[in-house]
Image: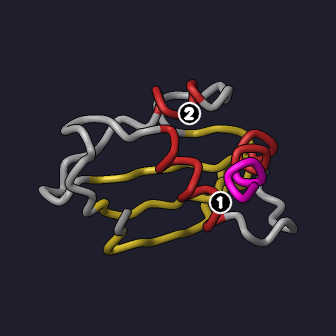
């Protein structure tokens, strides 16, 4: 898996902080419109390497080489997360996925 143009940021809505992470995938075996659970788990594993992050939510946005937004919601559900909207999960869910990806 290759990622280009990776980014991260924190947004605040009221008293709720969200860690937003994303990037462009350069994986030729990736389907056109969705991301595999393994790739999502690997991205979260790298992004959440520091267990002290204290945000409430994590939002993940990934694009393909053509800059099309990819569906990460299905992959998150496959990893036993419950996305709010299409790509946002609780930090606890994200940390659990990240921890399991590093095993």
Q: Is 51 situated left or right of 14 in this image?
A: right
Magenta stretch, main secondary structure class = helix
Q: Secondary structure at mark 1?
A: helix
Counting every numbered tag in the picture gives 2
Q: Is 69 situated left or right of 58 in this image?
A: left
The magenta segment is: 98-103
Disc 2 target residue = 76
Q: Residue at x 52, y 61 (%)?
A: 21
Residue 44 lies in quadrant: bottom right
Q: Nearer the viewer, residue 4 or 18?
A: 4
Q: Is disc 2 surrounded by few (<14), some (14 to 19) or many (20+) residues within 10 Å?
A: many
Indicate the position of residue 89 as horizontal and vertical percent values.
Answer: 65, 38
Disc 1 target residue = 45
Q: Quadrant of the N terminus?
A: bottom left
Look at the picture and state if 76 lies above or below 97. Answer: above
Indicate the position of residue 82 as horizontal and vertical percent values.
Answer: 65, 25
């Amino acid at each position: 898996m290759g990622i280009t143009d990776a980014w991260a940021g924190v947004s605040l809505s009221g008293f709720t902080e969200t860690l937003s992470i994303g990037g462009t995938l350069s994986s030729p075996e990736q389907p056109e419109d969705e991301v595999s659970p393994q790739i999502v788990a690997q991205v979260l594993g790298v992004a959440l390497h520091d267990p002290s992050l204290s945000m409430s939510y994590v939002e993940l946005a990934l694009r393909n080489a053509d800059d099309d937004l990819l569906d990460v919601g299905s992959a998150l559900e496959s990893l036993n997360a419950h996305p709010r909207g299409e790509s946002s999960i609780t930090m606890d869910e994200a940390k659990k996925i990240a921890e399991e990806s590093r095993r």
